[in-house]
Amino acid sequence: MPPRPSSEEGLAADGPAGTRDTGGPPERWALESLFLVLTSACNLRCAYCYNARASPARMAWPTAEAAVARLWAGGERDVHLLLTGGEPLLEFPLVRRVVEHVRRTTPRGRRVSLHLLTNGTRLGEEAAAFLAKHRVALQLSFDGVEPAQRLRGAWTSSALEALVPRLRARHRRWFLHRVSAAATLVPGTIPHLADSVEYLIGLGFSEVAVSPAFGDVRGWHDGLLPLLDGQFARLRRSSLRHYRRTGRVPFTAFRRGAPVRLSPAHALCDVRSGHMATVDVDGQVYGCAMVAGSALERPAGLLRSVRDAMRIGAVGDPDLAGRLPGYRDALDATGLFGRRDANRSSYGSCRGCPYVRDCSVCPLSIALAPDAASPARVPDFVCAFSRTLVKYRRRFPRQPDA
């Protein structure tokens, strides 16, 4: 059982829904995925990053230990533990300690998938060998060709170009099965989208994901719609050739299995279910890593309301699961997590959109938009990206094992 709250270790019990400690056994919380923000520090200053990281901090070991105990207490057979930041490899000794602790304490009959999200610039041979040995899946933030990657730092492109072949050569099996690339798109890098995805696949990544940037994203206008469409059309053609040749689809946006028939009444995000959570550096638990307190500096308006609603309590609170009803009520009050057809953008109402059933818009992109006021107003760039992606995914063949 997780340790009792301790203010010294950031485990003080406070959250949006006050509860009384009855002294009885903790209520079960069926967690499936848990993020640990090991540090709020980062060695990069990506031009599009919304994360303020004004006060770098490191997670204390008792907090990490309590978080792992919380995951085991949920009782789910298959769970995921994701190590993130900031840049988690700035705290590699803590990464090592957490991974070894998880491998040592996994209950009999349970399975845990370990993941690390990194920009890769601090991934030396010692860390790579350790992660490969312990079968830790690695998601490498890599935007692709140099003009796109430049927004992460001019020197990062050459650093990653040297890193990836080294990983592939020295840890081939791990690289092929557990290392993926995740690119972030902004309006200014749309002309490089297809080049970037094809470049990353050419480097040997078996999975390449692309998502639109959130926050203060500038430069989007309707004149870019044909360009965005053309880039996805080109990706469809190259992905189709790759699929016919190899039977694989590395560009994850085009992976299609049996159709999932969501109704327009379904929510865009499953965060309300409580199946996933994030433990911030100070031990506070949030529904999503994107609004963890260490990521935001003095949020206001809708973003502050969402941040406060998503703060469930302290990881060491024995009655943390008892706060879930209040957490869900607080989320409902924000208006962000309701029906998927209740929103709109400049391109019209989601209710009338032909792609609403497959929409991949993250509700938090709404809250993170500058001066966000309405929980129903989807940023135009995010909407355009989602519509175009779904359009071309529907035109891609289904894959038996997708």
Image: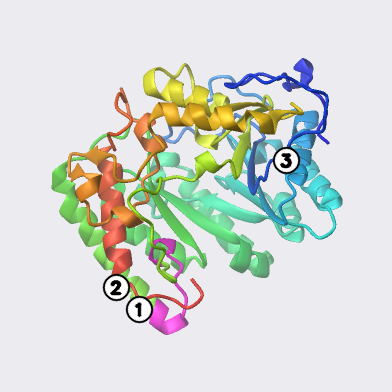
Q: CA distance from mark 1 to mark 3?
A: 48 Å
Residue 351 in the image, given as x and y percentages of width and height: 23, 47
Q: Residue at (31%, 59%) from the top-left corner?
A: 390
Residue 52, visible in the rendered structure = no
Residue 49 in the image, given as x and y percentages of width and height: 43, 34
In the rendered structure, find residue 118 and report the number of the disc placed on it: none
Quickly name the residue at label 1: 241
Q: CA distance from mark 2 to mark 3?
A: 48 Å
Q: Nearer the viewer, residue 167 or 224?
A: 224
- Whether 90 is among the magenta residues is no
Say how the picture is coloured.
rainbow
**Secondary structure of the residue carrying numbered label 2:** helix
Type of amino acid under label 2: Arg
Q: Residue at (50%, 63%) from the top-left corner?
A: 207
**Secondary structure of the residue carrying numbered label 1:** helix
Q: CA distance from mark 2 to mark 1?
A: 6 Å
Type of amino acid under label 3: Arg
Quickly name the residue at label 2: 237
Residue 28 in the image, given as x and y percentages of width and height: 73, 40
Left-right relation of 98 to 55: right
1 vs 3, front mark? 3
Q: Residue at (85%, 49%) from the top-left corner?
A: 105
Residue 216 in the image, given as x and y percentages of width and height: 33, 30
Quickly name the residue at label 3: 28
Type of amino acid under label 1: Arg
Left-right relation of 287 to 336: right
Q: Quadrant of the N terminus?
A: top right
Q: Are marks 2 and 1 in contact (CB under 8 Å)?
A: yes
Left-right relation of 192 to 291: left
Q: Which residues are magenta?
A: 243-254
Q: State the image quarter where residue 180 is shown.
A: bottom right
